[in-house]
């Protein structure tokens, strides 16, 4: 019997160690890492570890691979909470509100500015907006003290931009531990360039993968580039298809390249192009077009 068939044949209705079946007064628990076996107690699980470890390790790797190549429902940035449209991948086309850490698209900000409504309240939480830099800084600090991962990552981005990579690394690490996807991507970049921390390929790839699973198109694209560099154009294409579906244009260029090399078919490339265009179209609106026109004419959005 093959290893895969052996795994499939495991009877999960009984404890893998002692064989006791699951009945009303005996509830079995799954292995903490895999979905192959169940146990009636911690003691049985501990006793069974030497026999199960090899299969468990293999299955964990398989589950991780399945999760890595699963298409996320949306990007890590999700939707604008006002118009409910997907955010544009260009971070310059939205604004983070310091009072509530919500990302608002330029279209909604533009409509608000020219609506005649009160301009001293937040679009989302209706908090009074501070007027001076000192008050704005206090508002941001308050969100950081509340362990808001978006605010902590934003603080890290400012430090990163100013070249303070050590403190930026600290911010990203804390935000990533709180589940912020952008922070994982930024940590991967710091490990890649060796900024604020020693270059470490394994940790770089770990954070890129965490970000990709969370729906970060750029992190996903970078994983594709790494697979191509490692001589795996088929895996690179898988990553790029997912990233292209979320609107990443660089991944389209990558797909065209591996198509010429024969790694994907014409049909697969065409489907990726359609999905990419659909993602781009979904992020459009008359309000966002008006905001873009305002930016071009004035040289700045605000």
Image: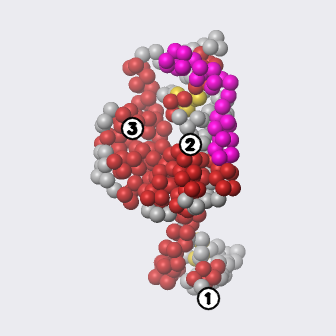
Q: Quadrant of residue 235?
A: bottom right
**Is residue 278 within the magenta segment?**
yes
Residues at marks 3 and 2 touching, judged by CB atoms closer than 8 Å: no
Query: If you read the primary sequence from the N terminus, does the residue marked by circle 3 or circle 2 appear first?
Result: 3
Q: Quadrant of residue 265?
A: bottom right
**35 or 70, which lies in front?**
70
| Dot 3 crowding, Cα within 10 Å, few <14, some 14–19, many 20+ | many
Disc 3 is placed on an element classified as helix
- Residue 156 is tagged as 3
At horizontal 34% and vertical 48% (from top left) the residue drawn is: 193
Q: Which residue is mark 1?
A: 1
Q: Quadrant of residue 147?
A: top left
How much space separates mark 2 and mark 1, taking CA atoms? 46 Å
| Dot 1 crowding, Cα within 10 Å, few <14, some 14–19, many 20+ | few
Q: Which residues are magenta?
A: 273-302
Task: Look at the image and tell me in which quarter the N terminus lies.
Answer: bottom right
At horizontal 31% and vertical 45% (from top left) the residue drawn is: 195
**98 or 162, which lies in front?**
162
Residues at marks 2 and 1 touching, judged by CB atoms closer than 8 Å: no
Main secondary structure found in the magenta portion:
helix
Disc 2 is placed on an element classified as helix
Q: Is residue 182 left or right of residue 158?
A: right
Q: Is residue 134 left or right of residue 13?
A: left
At horizontal 63% and vertical 26% (from top left) the residue drawn is: 288
Q: Which residue is mark 2?
A: 249
Disc 1 is placed on an element classified as loop
């Amino acid at each position: 019997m093959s290893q895969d068939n052996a795994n499939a044949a495991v009877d999960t209705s009984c404890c893998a160690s002692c064989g006791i079946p699951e009945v009303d007064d005996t509830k079995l628990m799954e292995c903490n890492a895999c979905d192959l076996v169940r146990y009636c107690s911690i003691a049985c699980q501990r006793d069974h570890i030497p026999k199960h470890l090899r299969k468990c390790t293999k299955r964990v790797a398989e589950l991780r691979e399945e999760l890595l190549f699963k298409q996320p429902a949306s990007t890590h940035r999700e939707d604008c909470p006002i118009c409910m449209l997907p955010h544009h991948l260009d971070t310059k086309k939205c604004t983070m509100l310091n009072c509530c850490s919500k990302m608002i698209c330029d279209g909604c900000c533009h409509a608000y500015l020219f609506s005649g409504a009160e301009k001293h309240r937040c679009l989302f939480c209706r908090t009074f907006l501070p007027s001076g830099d000192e008050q704005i800084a206090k508002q941001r600090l308050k969100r950081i003290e509340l362990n808001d991962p978006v605010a902590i990552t934003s603080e890290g981005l400012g430090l990163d931009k100013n070249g303070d990579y050590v403190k930026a690394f600290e911010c990203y690490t804390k935000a990533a531990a709180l589940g912020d996807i952008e922070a994982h991507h930024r940590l991967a970049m710091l490990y890649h360039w060796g900024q604020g921390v020693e270059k470490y390929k394994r940790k770089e790839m770990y954070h890129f993968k965490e970000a990709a699973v969370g729906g970060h198109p750029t992190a996903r694209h970078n994983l594709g580039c790494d697979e191509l560099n490692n001589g795996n154009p088929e895996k690179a294409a898988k990553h790029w298809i997912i990233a292209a579906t979320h609107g990443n244009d660089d991944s389209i260029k990558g797909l065209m390249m591996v198509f010429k090399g024969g790694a994907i078919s014409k049909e697969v490339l065409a489907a990726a192009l359609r999905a990419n265009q659909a993602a781009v179209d979904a992020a459009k609106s008359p309000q966002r077009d008006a905001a873009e026109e305002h930016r071009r004419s004035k040289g700045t959005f605000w």
